[in-house]
Image (cartoon, helix red, strand yellow):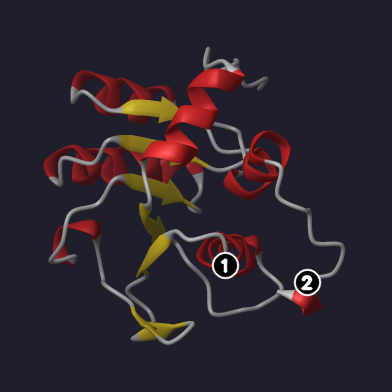
Amino acid sequence: MSIPHDGLTDDDIKKILEEFKIIAVVGMSSDPMKPGHYVPKFLMKHGYKIIPVNPTVDEILSLKSYPSLLDVPEDIEIVDVFRRPEYTPEVAKEAVEKKAKVLWLQEGIYNPQAVEIAKKGGLIVVWNRCLMKEHNRLMGSKPYTSLRKL
């Protein structure tokens, strides 16, 4: 299945990256070799507040991990999703309930039902894009050449 474009411009993405700094990472990983670990770590180093959401661990990168978005006791601006597409509609529902501003489905992730739920709930929806790569591309941050430097 080919993934359609999310319809957002570079200016739209840059505005998201500049305006919203509190990111709940659904599917954040404690494995340093997985994107669900090193992408949020990169974002932390660039001034974003990261909130891990993963029911299988209590803590990642010295941050308390929550079982679901609904368990996070604070406001969330971006919900960054590292889950398979079939799990994203539930995440979209929780993002709407938490009154997040953006649902961001990482590279390779797209689910039309999740997109529809989030858009109906008033969220900006980004899909099939990596937050770290977009930050590197649009915000002038230097890309890391090695995961060890993170």
Which residue is at the far top?
Answer: 7
Residue under label 1? 45
Total tally of numbered discs in the picture: 2
Disc 1 and disc 2 in contact, CB within 8 angstroms: no
Task: Name the residue that disc number 2 marks.
Answer: 147
Instruction: State the image quarter where residue 41 is shown.
Output: bottom right
Q: Residue at x 35, y 31 (%)?
A: 114
Which amino acid, by three-letter code, is at mark 2? Leu
Residue at 54% over, 80% down: 30
Residue located 47% across and 66% down the image? 28
| Picture residue at 12% right of the left edge, 66% below the top | 73
Quick check: 109 left or right of 95? right
44 relative to 108, above or below: below
**Earlier residue among tags 1 and 2:** 1
> Tag 1, which secondary structure?
helix
Looking at the image, residue 119 lies above or below residue 22: above
Q: Residues within 10 Å of mark 1 (few under 14, many from 20)?
A: few
The location of residue 99, given as percent across then percent down, is 15, 40
* The N terminus: image quadrant: top right
Three-letter amino acid code at disc 1?
Answer: Lys
Residue 118: x, y in percent?
A: 28, 28
- Picture quarter with the C terminus: bottom right
Residue 90 position by quadrant: top left
Q: Nearer the viewer, mark 1 or mark 2?
A: 1
Instruction: Find residue 117 and report its horizontal and vertical position in percent.
Output: 25, 26
**Mark 2 secondary-structure assignment:** helix
Q: Is residue 2 above or below residue 39?
A: above
